[in-house]
Image (cartoon, coloured by chain):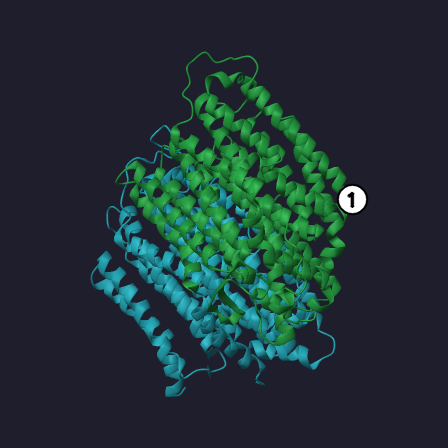
């Protein structure tokens, strides 16, 4: 059973060289291998989901599935993987969006197909590793490992300005990562001072007693590293360039998955490890979140480049995650989890459509489009659906996420929350503005343009169905992650106990069960 | 000198004898392949004596030398690296010397330089230190100018000669001052003076600083780095690899022993000086590397920065520091060999492949060579799964352990800067091929050429070392830990 966790990571990673070699046989072999590997991963994750009673997978101290092997005992580093509800949901999302990304690249990527899919699979393997690792160095390994393939994907297959974008992406994230590395090493040494042996294990470091000053610095490093990836202002400047210049499939991975690794890091490490600091820090972080929401929304309104608009809207949506993660109420955290999934689906869909438009018109400039509803109704109708999802139409998944976040945050920081909710209004402005400029109005194109292929249309329909399903019945996601959310709140509300090296026993985590929505 | 002394000196004696035999063999009959194989076997046999000698260590041989596990470990590094360089050189020389005249002495000089390197690793006395350094430096000088048909190597050789002479002069002056103040030429004896008196004598401090400057000149720490880019660029690529790895590695071994034995890190003024050197090296190396259009010069500046990182680890002091420095040296040797190895393997008769343009789109024509270079560069940048990450991890850990926060932050900042120029080269490898088939140098890019199986084998070995250390470093860590504890144990003993 523990081996299944390694399988989740190794399936894409081992399929990667295979799909590269598959290029020799046929162009489609690489694609099919990649698709097969990710489907296998998805099925495996589904099996894990159906098997495990989600009630026991609370993360902190108790894992649904756990696997530990010694790796570098000199530094107390082990190959320690653990699966809980949160990681399970995110892994499902990873495999699903991975499949979407490969379908999106089916017609988009025509040269060096094998190497492209090799990199996609390696990056996705790294992302899954990030969601599973609970040894800090192992986490860091995967965290950095996924950067190189993503970097290559942008640098080789990106649009005109790809070099600049790929550099910016790598440098920003690397700067944050190295801060994180120093903080991790410092914690390991503090653990050595306290117990006589260094350790990078999540559970060991959770119970570390820190001086206030030290905890502040460490928390700051952990915060910045993850927020850069999320991103939130002022660390966001890599985002529009990178999302825009990346090829369609990679944009989906970047916005749908890489941003989630930042959010995951915040929820898994930053918040529970430094509960006292984080409660002091919360107003600032929530303010940053609200700033991200508004800033992203305002900039999205003024974009003429379709992908840039989606990129800024993505920045805006990520602000909700920061807002909710630090509100530390059950509703807000559930909203965060929901938002993680919903944003992956809605932005993925939008990037797919933007890619489809680019393929047809060789431009991302909305000023050169217009009136396309008559020409390509399938693209237009799906775009309308995902634009509505993005603006938070009730009944769709994004609405649940954003609504829960705002609802849960209001009791903690009413003013910031009110400001943040303006972002939802602005989302309507830019989303509908995008629709207006692209699909309605004067038709400029006279050529006949092919509409979406059946495969792409079917893919988008599937994503739309998921959006509606989760929008009307969000319970599967919420129930799976509930134990994690409870444990998070527990760790935040009991900072005194948590900082005294008392391992929080699973049984105590369920004494204060709140009612599920 | 007893039999036991001779036994522990076996590695050095063995290599010395082989130097003589090689010389005779060349006089007897010139044959490139045979002499290259001979030099390779010499290193291999010497390497094989190391585990055998280990059981008899630590043992001081006269006042000049000490053979301990620490020295043996560095000998191993020096010998392995030399073997790799020999492997890389064979095909390179084959191309450079079409006439097949006078190639063979190259290997003799290489063995002599390595001999000097071995002496450096066991030195505990100024005399042996100086002898080893000069042997290494003079051999290198000839090696740098060895490709006589080209202009750049000659220029580089003269530069290196001048550097060597000035470094030696400064070193000798520093040694004289230290001898004047302490009346001893052994490192430990020099260190005793400070432990006995309250105030550190000014001349003693001056002497240590001068000796350190001499070493810094040879290591190429900023602001004593001026020669590095020119010599790296001018020297034949395998020799550049040799300078960057063996000569620096052996000198770091000596530096670590010197610093430990004289207790330099207990004096705040010296620590400040070293910290300054470390920061300046990192900043100068990385910032100047940003502007390079020449791969060899870029790697030269990056090596300055890496020596700065190494100094951060060294400054931490204590067992973690010695471990970190040694680990970093091994990692640094592997990745430097990897990067210069690719330059060597990709070079042609007209000149070394050193322009960025030479490497554009290399991945699509010669994927394995490009992958090797990318791996080395990512390792130099410290990306996980490569050895470079573990090396950087160790350096940061040593710094954090000693509470050198500013140095650690400087290291991080510089790592991020360095990433930019490494990526610039990596992205070039994956770029599109230029429209014209030739580069400004007139090197044909289209014609894929072989690199010789020796070079390919060496590169493959280096690649696997980088990956193995990057993924499973524990055995190496244990080896280093036992070896280094030996250095500190010996250092703590009363002389």
The percent coordinates of residue B6 (x first, y second) are 37, 83
Side (left or right) of A318 relative to A159: right
Quadrant where the N terminus of chain B is found in the figure: bottom left
| Residue in front for this viewpoint, A77 or B383 | A77
Side (left or right) of B249 relative to A497: left
| Residue in front for this viewpoint, A94 or A182 | A94
**Compared with residue B494, is residue A437 higher up or lower down, i.e. above or below?**
above
Quadrant where the C terminus of chain B is found in the figure: bottom right
The structure residue drawn at horizontal position 40% and vertical position 21%, both measured from the top left corner, is: A450
- Residue A35 in view: yes
**Compared with residue A122, is residue A469 higher up or lower down, i.e. above or below?**
above
| Residue in front for this viewpoint, A51 or A383 | A51
Judged from the image, the secondary structure of the residue bearing numbered disc 1 is helix
Local packing at callout 1 (Cα closer than 10 Å; few below 14, some 14-19, many 20+) is: some
The percent coordinates of residue A71 (x first, y second) are 46, 67
**Compared with residue A493, is residue A289 higher up or lower down, i.e. above or below?**
above
Q: To which residue does mark 1 refer?
A: A414
The structure residue drawn at horizontal position 37% and vertical position 77%, both measured from the top left corner, is: B51
Indicate the chain coloured cyan by its letter: B
| Residue in front for this viewpoint, A127 or B335 | A127
Please identify the quarter of the rendering in which residue B171 is found: bottom right
Indicate the chain coloured green by its letter: A
Q: Tell me the chain of label 1.
A: A
The percent coordinates of residue A223 (x first, y second) are 66, 52
The structure residue drawn at horizontal position 58% and vertical position 81%, both measured from the top left corner, is: B492
Side (left or right) of B322 relative to A212: left
């Amino acid at each position: 059973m523990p081996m299944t966790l390694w399988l989740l990571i190794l399936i894409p990673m081992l399929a990667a060289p295979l799909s590269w070699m598959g290029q020799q046989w046929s162009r489609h072999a690489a694609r099919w291998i990649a698709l097969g590997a990710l489907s296998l991963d998805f099925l495996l994750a589904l099996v894990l989901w159906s098997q495990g009673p989600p009630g026991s997978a609370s993360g902190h101290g108790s894992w649904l599935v756990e696997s530990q092997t010694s790796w570098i005992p000199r530094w107390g580093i082990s190959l320690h993987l653990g699966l809980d509800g949160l990681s399970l949901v995110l892994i499902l999302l990873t495999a699903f969006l991975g499949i979407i990304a490969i379908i999106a690249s089916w017609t988009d990527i025509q040269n060096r197909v094998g190497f492209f899919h090799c990199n996609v699979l390696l990056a996705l393997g790294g992302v899954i590793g990030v969601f599973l690792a609970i040894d800090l160095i192992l986490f860091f390994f995967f965290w950095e490992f996924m950067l190189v393939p993503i970097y290559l994907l942008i640098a080789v297959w990106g649009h005109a300005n790809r070099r600049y974008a790929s550099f910016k992406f790598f440098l920003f994230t690397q700067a944050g990562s190295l801060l994180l590395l120093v903080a991790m090493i410092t914690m390991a040494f503090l653990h050595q001072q306290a117990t006589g042996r260094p350790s990078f294990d999540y559970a060991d470091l959770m119970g570390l007693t820190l001086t206030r000053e030290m905890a502040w610095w460490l928390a700051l490093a952990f915060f910045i590293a993850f927020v850069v990836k999320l991103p939130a202002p002022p660390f966001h400047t890599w985002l529009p360039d990178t999302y825009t210049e990346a090829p369609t499939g990679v944009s989906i991975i970047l916005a749908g998955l890489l941003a989630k690794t930042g959010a995951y890091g915040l929820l898994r490490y930053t918040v529970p490890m430094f509960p006292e600091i984080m409660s002091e820090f919360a107003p600032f972080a929530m303010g940053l979140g609200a700033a991200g929401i508004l800033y992203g929304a305002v900039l999205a309104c003024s974009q003429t480049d379709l992908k840039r608009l989606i990129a800024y809207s993505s920045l805006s949506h990520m602000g909700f995650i920061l807002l909710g993660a630090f509100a530390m109420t059950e509703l807000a955290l559930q909203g965060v989890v929901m938002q993680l999934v919903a944003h992956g689906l809605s932005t993925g869909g939008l990037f797919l459509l933007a890619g489809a438009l680019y393929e047809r018109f060789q431009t991302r400039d909305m000023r050169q489009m217009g009136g396309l509803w008559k020409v390509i109704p399938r693209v237009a109708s799906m775009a309308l659906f995902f634009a509505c999802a993005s603006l938070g139409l009730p009944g769709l998944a994004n609405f649940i996420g954003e609504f829960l976040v705002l609802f849960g945050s209001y009791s903690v920081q009413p003013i910031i929350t009110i400001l943040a909710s303006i972002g939802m209004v602005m989302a309507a402005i830019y989303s509908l503005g995008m629709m207006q400029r692209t699909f309605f109005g004067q038709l400029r194109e006279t050529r006949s343009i092919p509409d979406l292929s059946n495969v792409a249309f079917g893919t988008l329909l599937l994503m739309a169905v998921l959006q509606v399903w989760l929008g009307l019945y969000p319970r599967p996601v919420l129930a799976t992650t509930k134990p994690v959310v409870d444990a998070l709140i527990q760790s935040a509300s009991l900072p005194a106990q948590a900082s005294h090296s008392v391992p929080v026993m699973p049984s105590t985590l369920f004494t204060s069960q709140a009612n599920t929505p | 000198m007893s039999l036991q002394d001779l036994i522990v000196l076996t590695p050095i004696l063995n290599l010395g004898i082989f130097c003589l035999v090689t010389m005779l063999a060349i006089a007897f009959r010139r044959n490139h392949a045979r002499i290259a194989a001979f030099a390779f076997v010499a290193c291999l046999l010497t390497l094989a004596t190391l585990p055998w000698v280990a059981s008899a260590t630590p043992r001081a041989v006269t006042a000049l030398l000490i053979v301990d596990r620490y020295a043996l470990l560095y000998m191993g590094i020096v010998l392995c690296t030399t073997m790799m360089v020999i492997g890389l050189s064979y095909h390179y020389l084959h191309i450079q010397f079409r006439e097949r005249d006078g190639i063979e002495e190259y290997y003799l000089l290489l063995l002599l330089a390595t001999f000097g390197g071995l002496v450096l690793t066991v030195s505990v006395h100024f005399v042996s230190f100086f002898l080893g350094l000069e042997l290494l430096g003079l051999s290198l000088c000839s090696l740098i100018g060895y490709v006589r048909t080209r202009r750049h190597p000659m220029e580089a050789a003269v530069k290196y000669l001048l550097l060597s002479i000035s470094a030696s002069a400064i070193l000798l002056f520093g040694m004289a001052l230290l001898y004047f103040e302490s009346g001893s030429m052994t490192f430990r004896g020099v260190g005793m003076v400070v432990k006995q008196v309250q105030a550190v004598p000014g001349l003693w401090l001056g002497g240590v600083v001068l000796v350190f400057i001499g070493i810094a000149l040879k290591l190429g720490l900023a602001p004593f780095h001026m020669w590095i880019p020119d010599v790296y660029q001018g020297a034949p690529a395998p020799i550049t690899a040799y300078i960057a790895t063996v000569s620096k590695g052996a000198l770091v071994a000596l530096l670590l022993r010197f610093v430990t034995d004289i207790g330099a890190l207990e004096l705040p003024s010296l620590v400040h000086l070293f910290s300054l050197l470390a920061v300046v090296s990192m900043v100068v190396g990385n910032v100047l590397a940003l502007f390079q259009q020449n791969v060899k010069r870029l790697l030269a500046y990056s090596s300055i920065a890496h020596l700065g990182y190494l100094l951060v680890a060294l400054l931490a002091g204590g067992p973690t520091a010695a471990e970190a420095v040694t680990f970093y040296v091994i990692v640094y040797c592997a990745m430097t060999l990897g990067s210069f190895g690719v330059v060597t393997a990709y070079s042609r008769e007209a000149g070394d492949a050193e322009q960025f343009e030479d490497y554009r789109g290399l991945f699509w024509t010669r994927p394995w060579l490009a992958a090797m270079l990318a791996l080395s560069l990512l390792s130099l940048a410290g990306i996980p799964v490569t050895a470079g990450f573990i090396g950087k991890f160790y350096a940061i850990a040593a710094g954090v352990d000693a509470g050198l926060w500013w140095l650690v932050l400087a290291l991080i900042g510089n790592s991020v800067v360095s990433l930019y120029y490494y990526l610039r080269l990596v992205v070039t490898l994956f770029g599109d091929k230029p429209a014209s088939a030739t580069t400004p140098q007139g090197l044909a890019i289209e014609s894929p050429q072989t690199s010789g199986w020796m070079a390919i084998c060496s590169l493959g070995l280096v690649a696997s070392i980088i990956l193995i250390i990057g993924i499973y470093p524990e055995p190496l860590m244990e080896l280093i830990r036992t070896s280094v504890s030996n250095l500190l144990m010996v250092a703590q003993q009363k002389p």
